[in-house]
Amino acid sequence: MKKYLVLLLALFVSAGIHAQQSRKDFRRDISISGSNYYAYPGPQKKQLTPAPEGYKPFYISHYGRHGSRYLIGTKDYDQPYLTLLRADSLGKLTAKGKEVLQKVSLIRDEARGRDGELTQRGAEQHKDIARRMYERFPEVFAGSANVDAKSTVVIRCILSMENALQQLLVMNPQLRIRHDASYHDMYYMNYDDTLLVSEKRRPEARKAYDDFARRHQNYRHLMQVLFNDEAYWQHEVKGQRLCDQLFKLASNVQSTELRHKLSLYDIFTFDEMYDSWLCGNAWWYIAYGPSPLTEGRQPFVQRNLLRKIISEADSCIALPKPGATLRFGHDTMVMPLTCLLDINGYGKQIDDLERLDDEQWYDYRIFPMACNIQLVFYRRSPDDKDVLFKVLQNEDEATLPIATDCAPYYHWKDFREFYLNKIDAYEAQRKAELGS
């Protein structure tokens, strides 16, 4: 009985530690709570595990999100601004509310005409990622190595690609670079699966999220900070919506040069920001993650991309000096691809949205601005049939759900077999369901 109680206590302590990790992360740096607006932090570990004896890197396959950007669409700027402006015209703002209105006005003015565009910080992020890639794996980029770069047709992705390529050319002007952004490649660079999109909107998923979000509404304090008349904000302001809008602005300031001049975080309590993050985290888990509410299928939206990664790697492995394949796209590709690969356990299915935090399913670890997945390939010689590789998530070594005798390295043949079988099984099941 005593041993049982000790074990039970240990489990409770362990669960408590895990449950507090996101809070610890936010207390260390509240900008992390911005989820997909979190500015790329760079690798968390400086050292990489040395390759097995005799193995050297020879090829890199990469998919990365564009760098830090402005918000997409004017409503994210206009709606909170106009809400506060109207209240100010009626004498309903506190002194702090007036200060917030001025800050929102500055943020809105800076973003005018820059809908979703790459910021200066976003450009710098991709230069830094390219520089570290070159410095970490110089053998891949030696001499007149080939670099094949593709981007989606969105300008922030194209500019992210160009900044990365400029940095590589600075480090080695001999590189032979091909770069393109075409609708021809969008079937895998930014695939839109209408069937999976429709399934993420199924009624049970919407209800589960709405119930979760309702339980985590937390805006009363903020309304009292902004408005001097409770009756006004109760009847004239959609409190949770305004809270969400201001938190999005607060989170995205870190992507712009205004981060050196102002912040909106001081208007929120810690719990208001935490609850806002919880709701966003749950939404992403349902919409692009392996949620049981959508039968764990959403990650398969990136099956075309994964097939392309595998087929291009097979072709490059056959070459004596393949170089690198670089792809530049969006968070809505990186997240499902991460879950499809089950990198670091992010393919796990969690029945209860309230347990996402306990299970350490944290969106900000997957897809900050400029997030990326790199597969780095190693061999002993061009004739080597036992090709190894490792996967880097945001430039840190990561795990996959396949067996290996040389972790964090894996055998490429095992990867191919495991994931092609996974995709084939999904497609066969879909075909049977659709009766075609």
Image (cartoon, grey):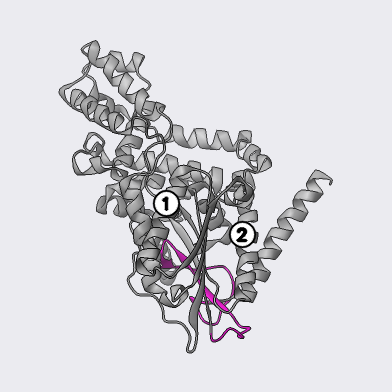
Which of 328 and 228 lies nearest the eye of the viewer? 328
Which of 77 and 403 lies nearest the eye of the viewer? 77
Cβ atoms under marks 1 and 2 closer than 8 Å: no
What amino acid is found at the position of numbered circle 1 in the picture? Ser
Q: Main secondary structure of the magenta part?
A: loop
Q: Disc 2 on helix, strand or loop?
A: helix
Residue that label 1 marks: 160
Q: Disc 1 on helix, strand or loop?
A: helix
Q: CA distance from mark 1 to mark 2?
A: 21 Å
Question: Left of 193 or right of it: where is 47?
Answer: left
Question: Left of 101 or right of it: where is 49?
Answer: right
In the rendered image, is residue 60 in sight? yes
Quarter that holds the N terminus: bottom left
Question: Left of 284 or right of it: where is 314?
Answer: right
In the rendered image, is residue 357 in sight? no
Q: Residue furthest top?
A: 90
Label annotation for residue 299: none
Question: Where is residue 86 shown, x and y percent of the image?
Answer: 29, 14
Residue that label 2 marks: 306
